[in-house]
Amino acid sequence: MQANDTLTLRHVDTDADYLACFPVMRELRPHLTDADAFTVQARRQAAQGYRILAAIEHDGDQQTVFGLAGYRRQENLLYGQFLYIDDLVTLADQRNTGVGAALIDALRQQARNAGCARLVLDTGLANARAQRFYFRNGLLSAGMHFNQDLR
């Protein structure tokens, strides 16, 4: 999938791909501190259906990951089949360039192709900037997410 002439959206498959995504993922998940541990966990999650779609810019032989979306297909009694976006992030200096919107569009199409009824994600209540982005891209607030730390 081409977002523009130099940006390609493609799924992450190799350890090298995961390692290339790590600096971008850290912008969203700063508690992740070890690239190798991230790769191991992402592969473990992949065994449960998790995939990463990366926005990669090509400049000759160089490739730079500018954004990514981690997602999985799920099913529950509330939504039926849906595509859940676990992670959506672009590099800070790439925000407002269309990378995030291209990732959302690609996932929306992938969900439709898979017969999913909905595209779903969670965001922090204080993350107003992300909320504005989601509204602009057709994702509407439908509830509140609750959780409890069991450690």
Image: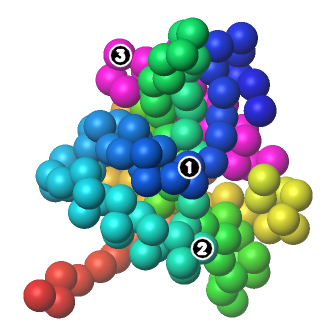
The residue that label 2 is drawn on is: 49
> What residue does disc 1 label?
12
Residue 59 drawn above or below residue 31: above
For the N terminus, the quadrant is top right
- Element under disc 1: loop
Residue 126 appears in view:
no
Q: Please give the range of residues in magenta.
A: 91-109
Display colour scheme: rainbow
Please tell me in which quadrant of the rendered image residue 79 appears.
bottom right
- The image shows residue 100 at horizontal and vertical percentages of 55, 32
Q: Residue 93 got which mark?
A: 3
Q: Is 123 or 116 nearer to us in this picture?
A: 116
Instruction: Name the amino acid, label 1.
Output: Val
Q: CA distance from mark 2 to mark 1?
A: 13 Å
Residue 96 among those drawn in magenta = yes
Q: Residue at x 46, y 73 (%)?
A: 45
Disc 1 crowd, CA 10 A, few/some/many (<14, 14-19, 20+): some
Q: Nearer the viewer, mark 2 or mark 1?
A: 1
